[in-house]
Amino acid sequence: MEPDKNRWKKRGLSVVPCRFAVHSGFFRFTVFVAIYHSDGSVVITHGGTEMGQGIDTKVTQVAAATLGVPMETVHVMSTNSLTSPNSTDTGGSVTSELNCQGVLECCKRLNERINPIRQEMGGAPKWTELINMCHRKGVDLSEKYM
């Protein structure tokens, strides 16, 4: 009889310690949201680096839902140091969430400025008409949050 080559089941367990310190006060990202009066497009720049984790998609969804516009209206520009200065490194699984929080705050503030004009126009005007009226009335259609 030939001896069994694998007489015993072999199983292994490996534990690799890994530490990545995440401090809530350490991460800061600057977000800038602008609405263009010519076509009503919403442009976002944020301090995160898109590297496949979906930051751009998530901030687009937050802006579209908060402002009540289609996602096709929202565009995300590349990060730059003019609109997003002093942002921290992307990492620690918090970048997407913190940039979404920044976009949410910017859009809430923009809505506070836009809503009085919306009410004057009857409550449900087309987005482009609403933004054009806001521009004519001197409403600031940009907001920054850190």
Image (spheres, rainbow, N blue to C red):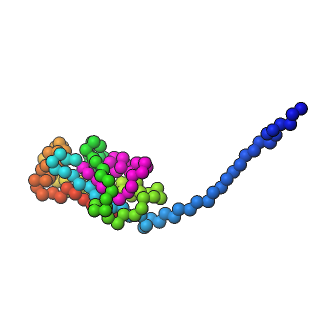
Q: Position of residue 34 (x, y in %)?
A: 23, 54
Q: Which residues are magenta?
A: 42-62
Q: Residue furthest left?
A: 136
Residue 71 visible: yes
Q: Is residue 79 left or right of residue 12?
A: left
Considering the image in quadrants, where does the N terminus appear? top right
| Residue 44 x %, y % | 28, 53
> What residue is rendered at 28% in x and 60% in y?
83
84 up-or-down from 14: above or below? below
Residue 94 position within the rendered picture, expressed as x and y whole percent measured from the top left: 44, 57
Q: Residue furthest top?
A: 1
**Picture residue at 36% right of the left edge, 47% below the top:** 57
Q: Is residue 58 magenta?
A: yes
Residue at screen point 17% across, 42% down:
126
In the rendered image, which quarter is residue 84 located in?
A: bottom left
* Number of numbered callouts drawn: 0
The residue at 65%/55% (across/down) is 15
Toward the right, the furthest residue is 1
Depth order, front residue of 63/120: 63
